[in-house]
Structure formats: C-alpha cells, structure tokens
Image (cartoon, rainbow, N blue to C red):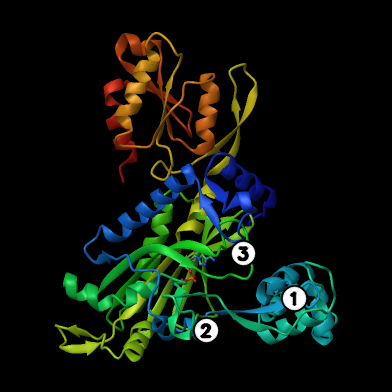
C-alpha cells in the first residue's frame, strides 16, 4: 500500500510553475478550471513522451498512424454509445448550488466515515462485528451501487462546499461531452461534439486505412490527439482535466484471437513504461469487474501518484462492438474479407488507451526527488532533482563555461550552437558551477558539459552525469556523438 503524500503534490505543482513545466490556463484572468497550459519545459517533456509512444507503436509493420479531425459527424457518438451512456451521476446542493459527482463524493465520504455509514444503514450486519474490517470494506465496495449511494448522499452528507445538511437533490445523469454547433445556425441540426476519445476517429477510418495500405489482420491503427470531457469534478492537477491528450491504438484481430492479443498488448505496454525508467513498484494492474458498455475485458495500468494509485492507461478488449455499431448507423459494410478462410467478418478489437497529459504528470512525479549530497565545504546540502529518462528529459544537456574569460565562453557558445542543431541544449554562464548544476538537476537535464582551463590545453571537456554526479572527460569534438549515443533508443 502506498503512503499518500499530499504535500509532495503541492511541491511538485509549484516547481512545475516556477520552472516552466505547467501553468494554469488563462492564469491572468483567474484560471479556467480543469485546463492547464504546458510551458517551455513541459511542452518538451510532453512531446518527448508522445514521440516515444509514436515510435513504439508505429515503427513496426503491423501498425499504421492517422490524425483524424476533432469534430466528427454527430452520428458517430450515437453509434459509439456516448450520447446514451457517457454520463456520470451528479447531485446539486440546493443551498449553494454546487454540483458534485456522486461517486467522488461517496469515495471521499467512504474513506472518512464508512463505519458510521454501515452502522446507520445496516445495523444488523454491523452488530457485534465492529472489528471485522472485511465487512466494512465489502460494504464500502457495495456503496458504489448508485441506489445506495444516492440514499447516503441525500440523507447523511453535509455539503462540502457550504456545510448545509440534507441539501442534495436526487442524482441525475450528466453527459460529459462538450456540445457545440457547426455553421451559423445554433439549432439541433447543427450540433456537433468535441470528441471525448480519439478512438472513434480510428474506427470510422478502419476501411480507409485497410484499403489504402493493403494491411491484413491482425493490424492496428494508432492516433495521438486532444480529447475533451466536461468532467464535473476536475482534480489532482493534470490527472482529471477537461481538455487532455490521448494516445490510442486499436488493434484489429480475427474473432477468437482477441485473448492472446490482449495479453500481448498488456505486456508491450507495461514494457514501454519500464523502458522509460518507471519502476515496477510504482506500477500495478487493476482488473475491471464493472465493464464499460463496449468491453469484454479491461485492465487499467495504475501509477502510484503522491495521492495514491490512479489509472494512466487502459487496455480494453472491445469485441466488434464499435465496428458493428458503425455498420448499423452508417448503413455501410465494414466487414473484412479473409483471403485465407474466404469469409467476411467484423474484426475484434484490442485497444490500448493512454492519457498523454496524465502520463506526463506520472513522469514528473516518478522523476521528482529531494536528496542529501556532499557539498564543497564538506557539509551536506539538499538537491532537488528530476531523474527523467534521458529521452524524456526536456533539456538534453547544459553547456557551462567554467569562467567567462580566456575564450572558455566562446568555445561554450560554439559548442552550444553545434549541439542545438540536434538537441535541446541550454547555455548557462552565470553563477558558481555548483549552483548551475543544481539548476539543471531541478529540471532533469541529464548531462552538463563544462569547458574549463584543461579544454584550452587538450580540447577535452567534462561531462557530469545528473544521477551519479560522476564526471568524465571526453573530446570536445566528440560531444555530439556522445549525446547521440546516450539518447539512442
Ligand atoms: N477509448 C477508451 C478511453 O477513452 P478511458 O479510460 O476513458 O478510455 C483512457 O481513457 C485514458 O485517457 C485514461 O487512462 C487516462 O490516462 C486518460 N484520461 C481519461 N480522462 C481523462 C481526463 N479527464 N483527464 C486527463 N486524462 C484523462
């Protein structure tokens, strides 16, 4: 069980702002809830993550990429089930009008007061078994059931916003899709939605990709793009936002082969995280027992955030649900012709669906560390360091002239210009070199290249590695190849 560290989360959020990873959206106007802007370092980190995903998913013969429009025909969302089912139950406080998601309110309450609830609602089950935590936990799971949840919320919970008791309305279903209109007329005929997932852009292009690439089953289609959900309660920084990015891949297989491919993709996706330096004890699988309307099986890959484990990626066995619904709603056949068996059928689908924004936050939380290290005066000092994998690190190297004279700064500027053609590199000549290292540690720069008096004699430079803080000398002319080698996939 992870130890929650809420203070760590606020330290990370403030570092993200101070060093230019993430800013509040429209901050000078007071911000817009559930929306965040990536700053100069954040956008590099996010792009690196997306590039790593794109490389892993599409540098293979059996996956193609697409980039579909955000606005799609409204029938897409009827066919996908989102118009009818993409809802969250919510309650309003009659006193202050604040709106809450029923399950979240309950989750918070269940953590604090599950014994009290059980004692009140099920005194018989509770009698004499106060010490049996399994009974209480079992009950906590059952209160996820909407009917019991509503009863608890409407009778037992004071509004967390204004404190009024018994002030909640009955629960209502709230659709999470953002609606807008195409063209000048704002009527029912012009309604479109901002897509709540990128997956449907892949399903509706299944035949286009099949025909234009002459792929055969099994094969996949990958896409990275923005998705929008009008979440009732946004929370935990980038974790649950209203605008975010997804990286999704639908892998089309012959019916009957889906279980094998499901396991294959689960392994691939876990390895992707491990290869990027996430440690195994920060990741775990959670198998769904309550399945989404389209799924036959589903696992979440969860990361241990400072506030506890939370989903970063879902692997879903989606059967032929989506293609069959699009056949039905569009009137077009989407059946695949299998050359070998001479049959026509709808492929089954294994989906891998990861949030780029949420994973960016996971990468920041995984990388963040405060360490005690030896200082020059023999005492200890604290350093804040981001242990990003070098391929994810926003800045790949810093070039530091030891002093601003004797031509060291000229050499350093020339080296910076040369390296900048290939990598994001930072030139820094101000302050003691130790302080310059600390500034780079804090943003996760893996290599600091120092030009010193020895450089003037033998054309070598010092490379200081961020995690070990070990130093080695390499040839000045070798700096580019050194970095290329370190950053190679
Ligand atoms: N196509 C399937 C699908 O969209 P999902 O579990 O709803 O599945 C997949 O979303 C991933 O998208 C999640 O694992 C999460 O990383 C990310 N995600 C979903 N809602 C999000 C939100 N409101 N804010 C940030 N990321 C979100």
How many numbered circles are shown? Answer: 3
Q: Is residue 131 among what the camera can see?
A: no
Numbered circle sitting on residue 298: none
- Of the residues under marks 3 and 1, which one precedes in the sequence? 1
Q: CA distance from mark 3 to mark 1?
A: 28 Å
Question: Where is residue 50 drawn, in percent x and y?
Answer: 39, 54
What's the residue at 40%, 41% (across, down)?
390
Is the distance from the Cβ of mark 1 to the nearest ligand 1 atom less than 8 Å?
Answer: no
Question: Where is residue 153 drawn, in percent x and y?
Answer: 76, 79
Give the labeled residue for mark 3. 234
Q: In this orientation, which residue lies closer to the viewer: 229 or 291?
A: 229
Question: Where is residue 274 drawn, in percent x and y?
Answer: 43, 53
Numbered circle sitting on residue 85: 2
Label 3: few (<14), some or many (≥20) within 10 Å?
some
Which mark lies nearer to you, 3 or 1? Answer: 3
Q: CA distance from mark 3 to mark 2?
A: 20 Å
What's the residue at 27%, 25% (across, down)?
478
Question: Where is residue 457 drawn, in percent x and y?
Answer: 32, 8
Is the distance from the Cβ of mark 3 to the nearest ligand 1 atom less than 8 Å?
Answer: yes
Horizontal side, residue 339 vs residue 205: left or right: left
Which mark lies nearer to you, 1 or 2? Answer: 2
Q: CA distance from mark 1 to mark 2?
A: 31 Å
Label 1: few (<14), some or many (≥20) within 10 Å?
many
Choose top left, top right, bottom left or bottom right for residue 67.
bottom left
Q: Is residue 420 among what the camera can see?
A: yes
User: Regarding mark 1 in the picture, which secondary structure is present there?
Assistant: helix
Give the labeled residue for mark 1. 136
What's the residue at 73%, 71% (across, down)?
98
User: Regarding mark 3 in the picture, which secondary structure is present there?
Assistant: loop
């Amino acid at each position: 069980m992870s130890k929650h560290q809420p203070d760590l989360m606020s330290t990370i959020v403030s570092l993200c702002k101070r060093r230019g990873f993430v800013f509040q959206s429209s901050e000078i106007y007071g911000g817009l809830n559930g929306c965040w802007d990536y700053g100069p370092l954040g956008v590099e980190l996010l792009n690196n993550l997306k590039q790593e995903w794109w490389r892993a998913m599409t540098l293979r013969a059996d996956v193609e990429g697409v980039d579909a429009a955000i606005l799609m025909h409204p029938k897409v969302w009827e066919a996908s089930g989102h118009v009818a089912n993409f809802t969250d139950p919510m309650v309003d406080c009659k006193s202050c009008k604040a709106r809450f998601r029923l399950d979240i309110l309950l989750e918070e309450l269940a953590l604090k007061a599950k014994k009290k609830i059980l004692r009140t609602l099920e005194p018989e089950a509770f009698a004499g078994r106060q010490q049996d935590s399994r009974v209480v936990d079992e009950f906590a799971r059952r209160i996820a059931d909407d009917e019991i949840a509503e009863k608890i919320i409407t009778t037992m919970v004071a509004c967390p916003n204004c404190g009024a008791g018994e002030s909640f309305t009955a629960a209502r279903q709230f659709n999470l899709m953002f609606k807008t209109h195409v063209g000048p007329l704002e009527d029912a005929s012009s309604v479109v939605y901002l897509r709540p997932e990128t997956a449907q852009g892949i399903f509706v292009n299944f035949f286009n990709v099949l025909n234009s690439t002459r792929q055969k089953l099994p094969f996949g289609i990958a896409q990275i793009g923005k998705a929008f959900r009008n979440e009732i309660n946004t929370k935990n920084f980038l974790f649950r936002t209203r605008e975010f990015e997804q990286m999704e891949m639908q892998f089309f297989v012959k019916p009957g082969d889906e279980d094998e491919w499901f396991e294959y993709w689960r392994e691939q996706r876990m390895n992707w995280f491990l290869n990027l330096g996430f440690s195994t004890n920060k990741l775990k699988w959670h198998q769904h027992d309550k399945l989404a309307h389209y799924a036959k099986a589903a696992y979440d890959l969860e990361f241990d955030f400072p506030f506890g484990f939370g989903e970063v990626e879902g692997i879903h066995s989606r059967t032929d649900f989506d293609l069959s619904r699009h056949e039905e709603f569009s009137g077009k056949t989407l059946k695949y012709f299998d050359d070998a068996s001479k049959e026509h059928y709808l492929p089954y689908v294994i989906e891998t669906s990861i949030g780029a924004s949420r994973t960016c936050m996971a990468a920041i939380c995984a990388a963040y560390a405060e360490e005690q290290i030896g200082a020059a005066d023999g005492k200890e000092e604290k350093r804040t360091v981001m242990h990003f994998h070098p391929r994810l690190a926003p800045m790949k190297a810093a070039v530091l002239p030891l002093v601003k004279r004797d031509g060291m700064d000229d050499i350093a500027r020339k080296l910076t210009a040369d390296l900048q053609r290939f990598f994001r590199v930072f030139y820094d000549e101000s302050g003691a070199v130790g302080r310059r290292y600390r500034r780079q540690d804090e943003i996760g720069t893996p290599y600091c290249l120092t030009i010193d008096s020895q450089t003037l004699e033998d054309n070598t430079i010092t490379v200081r590695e961020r995690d070990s803080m070990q130093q080695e000398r390499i040839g000045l002319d070798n700096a580019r190849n050194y970095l290329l080698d370190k950053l190679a996939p």
